[in-house]
Image (tube, grey):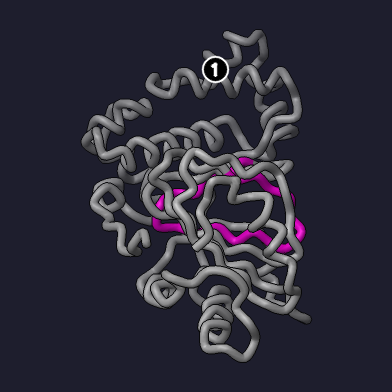
Amino acid sequence: MEQSTFKVDKYYIKKVDADKKSIYCHHDIMGELFVPRHKHDKAQMLYAEGDVVFVTTETKSYFLPARHFIWIPAGLEHSIEPKSEHVMMRNLYFPVEKDEDDFYKVEGIYPVNNLLLQMMLFTNRWNGHLKKGTPNFTIAKAIKAILPQICTNNLPLELPQPKDKRLGKILRYIENNLGETILFADVAHEFGYSERSLYRLFQKDLKMSFIQYYTIRRILKAIELLLERKLSVKEVALEVGYNSVPTFSNTFFKILGQRPSDYLNGEEILERK
């Protein structure tokens, strides 16, 4: 495997499209590396293990937790930033084929089930171009082929980027006070809006309500805290403003499809080699 001194970057990203027909594979512990905005002609499947990875496009900020993958369609500009030096990122880059399923045209975050995980284990020591006609190419193509059938739950783990500077200040206020219970009426008063006008601002700029944004942001912060493994589920709930653990657990389940205790106890299966 190439040593990632980024150093990783300016060459392996360019290598992705060097062979238009190959499937490109790159696995690495990325450290604190920030991969600046770029795009490639191939679609990208990025699996994260160990911590959180932030993927940012022009319009959205995606939050990729451990044991999940993000599908990035071909040609979509994005940047990548692992949260810590412990993040293992596993990438498969696929050439676009004629008459592809609509699944491959939309970015999304999905949990990795046991079937997909076992198939990915085959890629553990691969790196570089997988040539058509080789066993490794066939296995990688099979991984891509099953995604539309098994990945039916696109998780809402992204938040839109605000265009309005006024809204940016409000979102920073939310970010800085996640440990408190933030009421919409109080936010409107704090920033000099009527509730109706602030509601319209959220809907116009972010295409979501205040409560939708606030709920997702709390759960994303909770995932970060759970992955740090320093706090109990009850302590995490309090850190993101939930006084009721059952309410926190139910909200977490609605968004991520599993209870916070199950997520906290999840095992890292892929070896970091």
Q: Is residue 207 inside the magenta stretch?
A: no
Can residue 52 be seen here? The reply is yes
Quarter of the image for the C terminus: give it: bottom left
Residue 269 position (above or below residue 10):
below
Residue drawn 54% across the image and 41% down it: 33
Query: As rendered, which of 93 and 125 lies closer to the eye?
Result: 125
Q: Residue 190's spot in the image, x, y percent?
A: 58, 9
Residue 59 position (above or below residue 71):
above
Magenta: main secondary structure equals: strand
Q: Is residue 227 left or right of residue 105?
A: left
Query: As rendered, which of 4 and 175 lies closer to the eye?
Result: 4
Residue 84 position (above or below residue 27):
above
- Choose top left, top right, bottom left or bottom right for residue 21: bottom right
Q: Is residue 73 inside the magenta stretch?
A: yes
Residue drawn 62% across the image and 91% down it: 133
Q: Is residue 245 left or right of residue 219?
A: left
Q: Residue 12's spot in the image, x, y percent?
A: 64, 58
Residue drawn 40% across the image and 52% down it: 66
> Dot 1: within a 10 Å radius of its alpha carbon, few (fewer than 14), some, or many (20 or more) residues?
some
Q: Disc 1 designates what residue?
A: 173
Residue 90 position (above or below residue 243):
below
Magenta region:
61-80
Query: As rendered, which of 125 and 90 lies closer to the eye?
Result: 125
Q: Is residue 72 left or right of residue 213?
A: right
Q: Is residue 139 left or right of residue 258?
A: right
Q: Residue 29's spot in the image, x, y percent?
A: 44, 51
- Choose top left, top right, bottom left or bottom right for residue 113: bottom left
Q: How many marks?
A: 1
Can residue 255 be seen here? The reply is no
Element marked by disc 1: helix
